[in-house]
Amino acid sequence: MSRVAQVAVTVGLMAVLLSACGISAKPPAGTANISKSPNYHGLVDEPWTQQVKCLKSDHVKFREYLTANEKLPSIQIGSLPTGPTIIFEPTPGAAQDVQIQGGAQGAEVIGSAVLYPNQAANKLLTTVEACTSVDVSG
Amino acid sequence: MTTTDPATPSAAEPQAANVMREFTFPLPRLLKRAPEWVRIGGVLLLLSLVALWVRTRYIGGQFWMDEGITVGISSHSLSSIPGILRMDGAPPLFYMLLHIWMQMVGNGEAATHWLSEIFAALTVPVGYWAGRTIAGKRAALMCATLFAFNAFLDYYSLETRMYTLMALLGLLATIGFINGFVYRRRAYVILFSIAQALMFYTHAWAIYFAAGSVISLVLLWKISGEDIRKGLIKDALMAYVGAVVVFLPWLPNFIFQAIHTAAPWDTKPRFGAPIQIAQSVFGGASITVILLLAAGVGYSPLASRSARVTREAKVTLMLFTLFFVTLLLAWAGSQVTPAWVVRYFAPVVAPMLILVAIGMSRAGVIGAIAIVFTIGFMIRPSAFEPKYKSDMQDIAGEMKPLIHKGDLVIIGQPESTPLAYYYLPGGLKWSSTIGPVKDPTSMNWVDAMKRYRAANPDKVLTQELNSLKPGQQVLFIRPMTEGVANWKAPWTSLVRRRSAQWGAILHADKQLKPEAWAPHNYRGSCCIADAAVLYKKVR
């Protein structure tokens, strides 16, 4: 192996070593596996927690999902076209913005939720509106 | 304790020295030498001017929905206003005064707000009169100060509605009631009767005030001796019958309105009334606590057994029952037919402020400190005056260059139509989510809830859209509903839903192409704001 090749292999190995290539997670010094770290306290704050509880208590059938493009938390009540759809924007201001710009003409804005009535019956819609309003101030 | 004429200083101030350390306001020699009427007049003028300065900082602020309706109705001829109001639900006095006022100064925001300003400003000297006749000079000055620096009057002096007029009439009625029935100065009974009649013609809560005053009178009869009872029933009958006789011409309209119009946009009140009063009448919890503590100190001598039978104690009790029973009846009535919003408190503002002012006037230096705090709290113009009430002016400003004669305007919240009509240019066709609008200057509340439930969005809107030619435009204005407080009532929750249903149909219609939206700059609003999208019919 030429001197140039030796240097190249050495540099390459050092690079691999320094970048910790081959280890799925890069633990902080002295920690074997980050997923077992006692310091991990992150928790996703789902915007639908109260709404889901309310819908369940009213025996309404629904499913949670994320919208295709923006991955916004959403709830589909029953099935389209008769079931209402709730899409949660990050803030009430963002929901307001969607309405002002004409992006949700077919929707009711309640807090940060953009609720599309679709072709739902009045009774179901009343229940869904009430559940969407839970924990909304103002 | 005194039962002599409270207008004389000796009758007004005897308690203070016993209760608290007294205070005197040091006056320069020049002022001391001036006649009393000059000094008092100067103080009242100063108070009125400072109050006017505070209350006129945002005098030109844009209207919100209710003001749009008021100006719209008042723009009709005097003879047709009562007929329009039959469908609206309000009595005619303020609308007729506003009509005359607009003939003189125009229908701009500042011009019409000035009418409410004047009624609010009048409460200062009239408040002084109230205090002077009921409890003496010091109470009179306290009273005038409280009326000059008051959250309720600050807020509604900037609203082209009847609430400052109602507060002024409530003040006159209170002066008439206490002087006429408790002090038995019979000329004041006439004042009470006239004020009560005018209240009937100003706002429906006059009924609750009248009922509250009747119950107060019954109580007065029960706790009084012959000095007060003598001729009391006769005087009371004369006062109430007189007021009702004056009200008779409007009575058929009132009954019709009570059956057909109501307030479907309101919800039943719960137990938050004390908080509402603290915030809307006194300006917040801190100031309320300060005022009540000071007044409580002033009234503390009335706790003794001997003091409870005095005329002063009766005045205190009557002022309390006048506002408390009125509110209690309104609260109970609103459990059946909701009509409970803070602006309706107008007739009871006066008895509350007079009650507090008299107490403070007897609390010596504590009362003086409380009044200084009151001025400090209330003198900030931004504290209680709404800078932005709605955004319709902005929407109209943005849409004016884009919209043409014959275009269709559809309003998501039907009662916002007069507001949009006020700000948008003329020559447009009008519709709302309840159906086509013949008169966009007013709102027809007759059986409105029933009609709104029956209005099928597909059917109503399809007819409207088919009437348009290609190239014509549709401006859809709908309320922003992100908060829930305004959208709980049967009417408002249906407004929110109907707006979405109409929006969905417009959005899905292939004949329509979105052209513009507004507002591009939304500063928020105290009341109800809207968003608008302009569509063009392309085929």
Image (cartoon, coloured by chain):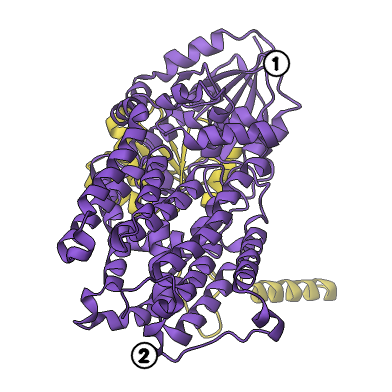
Chain colours: A yellow, B purple
Q: Check whether the beta carbons of the residues at disc 2 and disc 1 lie within 8 A of each other.
A: no
- Residue at label 2? B18
Which corner quadrant holds the N terminus of chain A?
A: bottom right
* Amino acid at the residue labelled 2: Asn
Label 1 sits on a secondary structure element that is loop
Q: For residue B258, what is the image quadrant?
A: top left
Q: Chain of mark 2?
A: B
Residue B84, given in percent of the width and then of the height, sits at 46, 23
Q: Chain of mark 1?
A: B
Q: Is residue B310 left or right of residue A132?
A: left
* Amino acid at the residue labelled 1: Lys
Residue B283, given in percent of the width and then of the height, sits at 48, 65
Q: Residue at x 29, y 28 (%)?
A: B255
Q: Residue at x 52, y 46 (%)?
A: B527
Q: Residue at x 26, y 68 (%)?
A: B314
Residue A27, given in percent of the width and then of the height, sits at 53, 76
Residue B121, given in percent of the width and then of the height, sits at 58, 56
- Vertical order, B237 against B318 (above or below): above
Q: Mark number for residue B405?
A: 1
